[in-house]
Amino acid sequence: MRSLRAYAVLAALVLSQAAFAQALPGGCRIGEQANIPLTFTDDLRPVAQAAIGSASVPVMLSTAAQESAVFNKKVLERLGIPVRSTTSRLFAADARNDTGVDILREIMIAPIKDFSFGPNQGKSGDFPVEDFMDDTFGVRIGAGVLLKHDLEVALDAGYLKVFQPKGCFREHLAYWDPQAVAVMSMGDPWKRDSRVVFHVRINGQTITALLSTSTPQSYLPKAAAARLGLTPDSPGALREDPLPGDKADKPVWKLPLPLLTIGALEVKDLDLRLMDLPHSGEILVLGADFLHRHRVYIAISQQKIYFSPIATPRVMKRGKVDVIPQTL
């Protein structure tokens, strides 16, 4: 009897979501472009698959990375794809340049033929290359691809979905939840950077936040945290091991955050990491730990982000991909 009741509740939920999706006005076409299945690293970051020619390669997904796609030199060499070096100017205004002046830097590029990921099929051209720590991931996909159109991030259900809505500018696009909270998002008006940010409140003060699918744990620069009244001496703070790649003199503290608000959404009991991060600005990064508790629709078409809390997060299937530390 219990299983029958559970089935009835699940069926009602599915039907209600379908009914809500069908209730969108006739002039609104949500336009699903791709459904990208996910597996997960040991720390539950999402991993997808892409194709370089006939070779399938694991993909790191990073909504917080500015670039479109960066290929792994080790994987390209294994596939017999040549990599060459060249120089590129990095302007002083670029967030990746902390020198304050224009600089020339050496970069690697490779001619990629027939690259396919999600809605992007059969792309060819010269792509940037980095020498990743190992050959676990073949490519890192950033906001330049992921946030070109609307993106649903459903780590709880094991997928990303890409949408290209038409005639839906004033409609509620979180089709699975009519009660999802929407907040305004902000991005580069010149479209040089596809990443979007939004405002949250902690201890009565506002701070800018960024969603990062490739960051296991949500974190805040220690200097920004101090302005919000959060310090390593706050109640419940615990010192942890430094992040991989960081020196021992850059410790990390885990701090329980009783309440964070995003518009009308109250996020309770979220653990934050406080870190000494140079040139990081005042950005709260909400990582995979947050995204496993909330389904999110990033509506590029509306300059909004919808948040829907998950009452009982599922235990997701983990992939066989090893954890690879990556900088934001």
Image (spheres, helix red, strand yellow):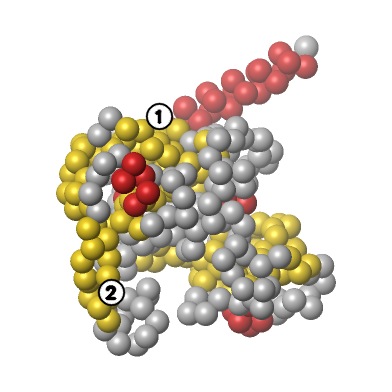
Q: Which residue is mark 1?
A: 22
Q: Residues within 10 Å of mark 1 (few under 14, many from 20)?
A: few
Look at the image and tell me whether residue 311 can be seen.
yes
Q: Mark 2 or mark 1, which has the lower sequence index? A: 1
Q: Nearer the viewer, residue 6 or 129?
A: 129
* Vertical arrangement, residue 120 with respect to residue 277, above or below: above
Residue drawn at 23 percent across, 63 percent down? 85
Q: Secondary structure at mark 2?
A: strand
Residue drawn at 65 percent across, 18 percent down? 8
Residue drawn at 59 percent across, 35 percent down? 318
* Quarter placement of the N terminus: top right
* Vertical arrangement, residue 112 with respect to residue 265, above or below: above
Residue drawn at 69 percent across, 58 percent down? 270
Q: Which residue is mark 2?
A: 105
Q: Secondary structure at mark 1?
A: helix
Q: Position of residue 86 (x, y in %)?
A: 21, 66
Q: Position of residue 68 (x, y in %)?
A: 31, 54
Q: CA distance from mark 2 to mark 1?
A: 51 Å
**Image quadrant assignment for residue 207:** bottom right
Residue 197 numbered mark, or none: none
Q: Indicate which label's residue lies in the foreground, 2 or 1.
A: 2
Kind of residue indicated by mark 1: Gln
Kind of residue indicated by mark 2: Arg
